[in-house]
Image (tube, helix red, strand yellow):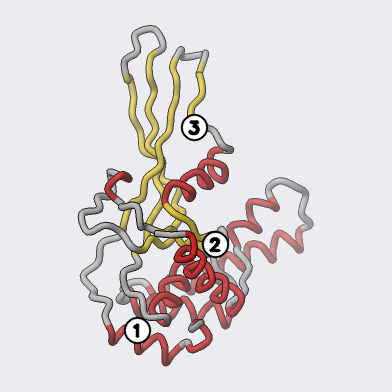
Amino acid sequence: MDYLSIRYFEKIMRNANAQYPRISPYRVMMRSAQKYVTPAQKEWIVEIGRTLDAYRMRVAGKSLTEIFESDIRGLKNNRLGDCGESSALSMGALFANGYTDGKIARLIFEGQARDLSTGKIVSKRNFDTTHECVVLNLAKNACSENPKSYGKNSIVMDAWEGFCSNISEAFKKYFDIFLSGTYKHIDKTNNVELSYKPRFYFYKHNEEFNEKTVEKFKKLFPDLII
């Protein structure tokens, strides 16, 4: 996928973000934990989180397109949304512009510990960030466990973090965001080297996204069309 193509999808994402500005309860909560907040501020933080959680409960069990539609309307009404709602907005924006191959993806870091004395791998563990984004143009044979299979034309659209890029650039950003740029480090106490590899988990669903989906979202959300 060439630079201009990525910039085109970035334009779709930026228009969606501009049309549906929102506060992220998660970001507010994380920032408040780093500094003193007044009781009134704390009450407001709890309330916006409660509002968003209640909205999520109302859409539980619905089809994906119904959830996307509901999430986008919720962004318009409440102006509250984290990465899940931002991904729903991205999917709606893709539909409104004629693209149906986007997939909701969840970021996973595969961690392993290597004994520095023997060189052997002594432990493996997956770290679920719970962060969601959208990946499009995936290769037909793409396998969640193997990032090399995603395809050179794959694009990550992350409306919550505000970027659109190829897979490798996205993973670099995620290392900075979630691991402070740490690819590996030495645990001297246990004499092991800890290393991390990012990948996605792609949500499975039985719903087909097609021309009817495109026409529906064009009609419902014309402000998402560029």
Camera sees residue 58: no
Q: Which residue is mark 3?
A: 183
Measure the C-alpha gap from mark 3 to mark 1: 40 Å
**Point 56% across, 37% down: residue:** 181
Badge 3: residue crowd in 10 Å (few <14, some 14–19, many ≥20): some
Q: Which residue is mark 1?
A: 214
How far is the residue under mark 2 from the one under mark 1?
A: 23 Å
Q: Secondary structure at mark 3?
A: loop
Disc number for residue 176: none
Q: Give the labeled residue for mark 2.
A: 160
In the picture as drawn, the residue positioned furthest to the bottom comes out as 219
Classify 10 Å Cα crowding around label 1: few (below 14), some (14-19), many (20 and above).
Answer: some
Q: Residues within 10 Å of mark 2 (few under 14, many from 20)?
A: many
Q: Nearer the viewer, residue 142 or 161?
A: 142
Q: Position of residue 70 (x, y in %)?
A: 43, 80
Judging from the image, what secondary structure is the residue with disc 1 in?
helix
Q: Residue at x 46, y 76 (%)?
A: 71
Secondary structure beneath label 2: loop
- Amino acid type, label 1: Val
Query: Up-down: is 37 above or below 63?
Result: above
Q: Earlier in the sequence, mark 2 or mark 1?
A: 2
